[in-house]
């Protein structure tokens, strides 16, 4: 068993495989750390800082999503500094973005007893919704700049590089290049960015329209598993169906072929199924 | 006489800064010849014996860093001169490169030889155009003198594009690679994974100039000045309410009061003539009270006792009429504008500190600001966010410095 490391997590000895991140080690010890930008199929962006833990001997706190566990590390997941950092991260994000559809952020706020108004009163991310195509809508007022969409569009999945972070400081934002509308950009509408967005800032047009009409109702949505019929790759599709209509298509994150990623046909090419007019 | 000119050429130097005569006048030709005949281990041992520490702000032991890069696994290695110098109140690398560009370049070539790098970069602040021309000319001179060419180290000058954050070492690598200058997460450290994932040695201009003068002499000469902990001299960028603002070279351990008052240094206070505070280390530095200034020396241990550090060597002097809340507002705006925006504590935190400062609420929101500052220090990715609240905290800790208190 040369390939394992043993560390302390909140005073409890834990042995994990070499290469395991502190986040995964904390999971194993059932001292789960909260995360916002981390995603099981994406390279850690290290951006949100919700997952920080205290490692003995380290001057600053450490992002557990990307730091690899080492033998003899002494990790605290709930020290005073960790609790303060989590709380402030939640408060800062709540002071900027619309968190209504961001369950992970709401969870972080609750577990850290964040005061939602402590840092409000200044600039926010409120901005007009961008509906410039028929497949997905960008409501960046909800964006927390987690970088997930950029990574999904880039070399973690899609390799299209249609979107990136532009601007700096508080003005940093997700951009399709020079502020362009998506149809003018390199976007191929695979919707992989939408699939990984944790806040509803990116949303399929069908879901968006139904929500606007007050018709979106999770309790009435059923999921049906199938295989995409467009090509021979064999991507598994979950058809989200409400009132006998497909309202969204996803693929399981743990599917060995897709890892949750699809192409434009599998994700958005479902209208034909519902067409009355089959020839 | 309080100024000691070793990194800066002494005042009798007559040759043009970028000329073969200067190379010889400063003994840099011999320094190169000596170093090139030495093994990596011998060079690194000499650096360790000299006790040189990084002059870019963090004061990391230089010999240790060279040793790590030398030992790091990998065929391709890089060395980088960090001349991005964009910290508020810091202009010493500019003067050093103007007055003696060959020194830092000689240090860079010795570094490349010591760690086994064939490619070097000089990353220079975009606004330093004239300095860049002089640096390029000095590079030509070195090549003409036989220290360049196909078998030697290829040195490339890269210009920054106006971002303070690009001076942070890993952001600088991203910039050279053609990416957004967003700092990378550490570890891995540059000594193992820097430019294009290869072991990279990055040093400040002044650090490299120290290497050049060390090899033009020896460790015994080098340690003639300085303290037990920190040998050598330090460039100070003196600005604000002072009779003779400018760049001075002084030995480590010099009393701060001498830097302000000595006739050949600051030459006493300007403005009201009464000291209000000194901001040591730039925007990310610490405000010191007049009493602390009177009792502190330019030395890491002495300054550590009052919670301060030398940083890049910026010394900004404020007389007793300056409202430091106004200064803090300026500093806050600097950080809000220069944050790369990557991580939450810094992206939103610097904005909130700026807003609170602009509203004039810095003193009333003490509790909130302390919680925010702690989170920024603890959870920001890089040194920018981690140090952005330090100047503010130093005043919250020294209520006596508030003009309006
Ligand atoms: C925001 C930020 C800006 C920095 N800017 C500079 C700079 O302009 N020049 C510099 O030498 N170091 C700068 N540094 C420090 C570098 O990251 C690095 O530590 C330094 O270049 C190492 O060289 P040294 O050991 O010779 O000091 C900066 C650090 C941070 C966090
Ligand atoms: S839909 Fe696909 S191509 Fe378009 S931005 Fe999103 S991930 Fe990139
Ligand atoms: S749009 Fe969504 S996925 Fe992209 S950065 Fe914002 S919150 Fe993250
Ligand atoms: S601390 Fe600030 S400058 Fe550094 S990575 Fe985070 S946002 Fe960027």
Image (spheres, rainbow, N blue to C red):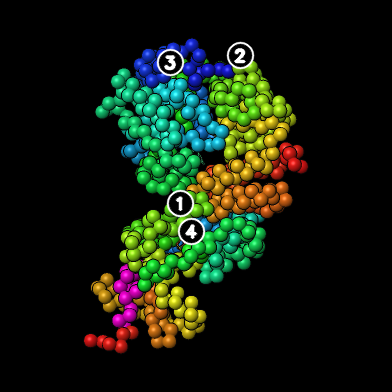
Label 1 residue SS:
loop
Residue hosting label 2: B1
Tell me if B371 is positioned left or right of A138 in this view: right
Which residue occupies 52% across, 57% down? A48
Which residue occupies 47% across, 39% down? B167
- Return the x and y of residue B38 as percentages of the image width and height: 38, 22
Which residue occupies 45% across, 41% down? B162
Label 4 residue SS:
loop
Query: Looking at the image, which is closer to me, B324 or A85?
Result: B324
Is disc 4 in contact with disc 3, using a CB cutoff of under 8 Å?
Answer: no
Residue hosting label 4: A145
Which residue occupies 38% across, 41% down? B176
Residue hosting label 1: A167
Which corner quadrant holds the N terminus of chain B? top right
Badges 2 and 4, same chain: no
- Return the x and y of residue B42 as percentages of the image width and height: 42, 24
State the extent of the magenta-drawn residues as a range.
Answer: A258-273
Q: Nearer the viewer, mark 3 or mark 2?
A: 2
Badges 2 and 1, same chain: no
Asked if B195 appears above or below A27 in the picture, the reply is: above
Tell me if B118 is positioned left or right of B234 in this view: left
Mark-to-mark CA distance, 2 and 4:
55 Å
Marked residue chain, label 1: A
The answer to whether the residue bearing label 3 lies less than 8 angstroms from the nearest atom of ligand 1 is no
Image quadrant in which you'd find residue A59: top right
Mark-to-mark CA distance, 4 and 3:
52 Å
Asked if A266 appears above or below B384 in the picture, the reply is: below
Q: Earlier in the sequence, mark 3 or mark 2?
A: 2
Crowding around mark 1 (Cα neighbors within 10 Å: few <14, some 14 to 19, many 20+) is: some
Badges 1 and 4, same chain: yes
Asked if B372 appears above or below B221 in the picture, the reply is: below
């Amino acid at each position: 068993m040369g390939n394992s490391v043993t560390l302390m997590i909140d005073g409890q000895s834990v042995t994990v495989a070499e290469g395991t991140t502190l986040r995964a080690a904390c999971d194993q010890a059932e001292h789960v750390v909260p995360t916002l930008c981390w995603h099981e199929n994406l390279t850690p962006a290290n951006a949100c800082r919700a997952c920080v833990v205290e490692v003995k001997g380290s001057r600053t706190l450490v992002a557990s999503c990307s730091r690899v566990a080492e033998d003899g590390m002494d990790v605290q997941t709930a020290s005073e500094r960790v609790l303060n950092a989590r709380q402030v991260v939640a408060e800062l994000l709540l002071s900027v973005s619309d968190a209504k559809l961001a369950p992970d952020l709401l969870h972080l706020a609750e577990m850290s007893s964040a005061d939602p108004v402590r840092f409000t009163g200044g600039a926010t991310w409120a901005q007009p919704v961008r509906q410039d195509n028929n497949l997905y809508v960008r409501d960046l007022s909800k964006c927390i700049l987690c970088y997930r969409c950029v990574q999904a569009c880039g070399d973690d999945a899609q390799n299209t590089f249609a979107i990136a972070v532009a601007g700096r400081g508080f003005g940093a934002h997700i951009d399709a290049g020079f502020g362009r509308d998506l149809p003018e950009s390199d976007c191929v509408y695979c919707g992989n960015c939408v699939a990984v967005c944790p806040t509803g800032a990116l949303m399929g047009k069908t879901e968006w329209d139904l929500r606007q009409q007050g018709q979106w109702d999770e309790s009435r949505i059923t999921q049906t598993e199938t295989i995409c019929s467009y090509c021979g790759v064999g991507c598994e599709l979950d058809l989200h169906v409400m009132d006998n209509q497909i309202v969204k298509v996803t693929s399981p994150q743990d599917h060995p072929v897709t890892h949750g990623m699809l192409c434009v046909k599998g994700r958005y090419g479902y209208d034909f199924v519902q067409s009355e007019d089959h020839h | 006489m309080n100024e000691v000119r070793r990194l800066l050429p002494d005042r009798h130097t007559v040759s043009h800064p970028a000329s073969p005569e200067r190379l010889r006048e400063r003994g840099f030709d011999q320094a190169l010849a000596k170093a090139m005949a030495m093994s990596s281990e011998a060079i690194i041992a000499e650096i360790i014996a000299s006790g040189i520490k990084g002059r870019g702000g963090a004061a990391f032991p230089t010999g240790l860093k060279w040793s790590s890069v030398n030992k790091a696994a990998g065929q391709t290695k890089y060395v980088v001169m960090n001349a991005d110098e964009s910290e508020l109140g810091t202009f010493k690398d500019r003067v050093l490169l103007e007055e003696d560009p060959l020194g830092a370049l000689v240090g860079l070539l010795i570094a490349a030889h010591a760690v086994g790098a064939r490619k070097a970069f000089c990353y220079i602040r975009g606004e330093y155009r004239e300095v860049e021309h002089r640096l390029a000319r000095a590079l030509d001179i070195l090549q003409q003198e036989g220290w360049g060419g196909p078998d030697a180290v290829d040195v490339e000058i890269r210009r920054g594009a106006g971002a303070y954050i690009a001076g942070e070492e890993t952001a600088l690598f991203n910039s050279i690679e053609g990416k957004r200058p967003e700092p990378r997460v550490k570890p891995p450290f540059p000594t193992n994974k820097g430019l294009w994932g290869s072991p990279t040695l990055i040093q400040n201009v002044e650090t490299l100039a120290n290497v050049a003068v060390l090899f033009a002499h020896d460790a015994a000469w080098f340690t003639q000045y300085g303290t037990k902990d920190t040998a050598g001299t330090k460039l100070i960028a003196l600005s604000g309410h002072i009779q003779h603002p400018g760049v001075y070279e002084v030995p480590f351990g010099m009393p701060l009061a001498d830097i302000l008052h000595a006739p050949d240094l600051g030459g006493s206070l300007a403005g009201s003539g009464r000291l209000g505070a000194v901001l040591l280390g730039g925007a990310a530095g610490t405000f010191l009270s007049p009493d602390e200034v009177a009792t502190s020396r330019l030395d890491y241990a002495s300054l550590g006792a009052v919670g301060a550090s030398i940083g890049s060597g910026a010394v900004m002097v404020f007389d007793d009429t300056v409202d430091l809340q106004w200064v803090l507002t300026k500093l806050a705006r600097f950080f809000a504008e220069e944050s790369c925006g990557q991580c939450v504590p810094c992206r939103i935190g610097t904005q909130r500190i700026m807003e609170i400062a602009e509203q004039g609420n810095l003193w009333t929101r003490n509790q909130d600001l302390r919680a925010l500052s702690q989170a920024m220090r603890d959870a920001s990715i890089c040194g920018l966010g981690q140090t952005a609240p330090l100047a503010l905290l130093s005043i919250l800790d020294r209520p006596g410095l508030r003009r309006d208190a």
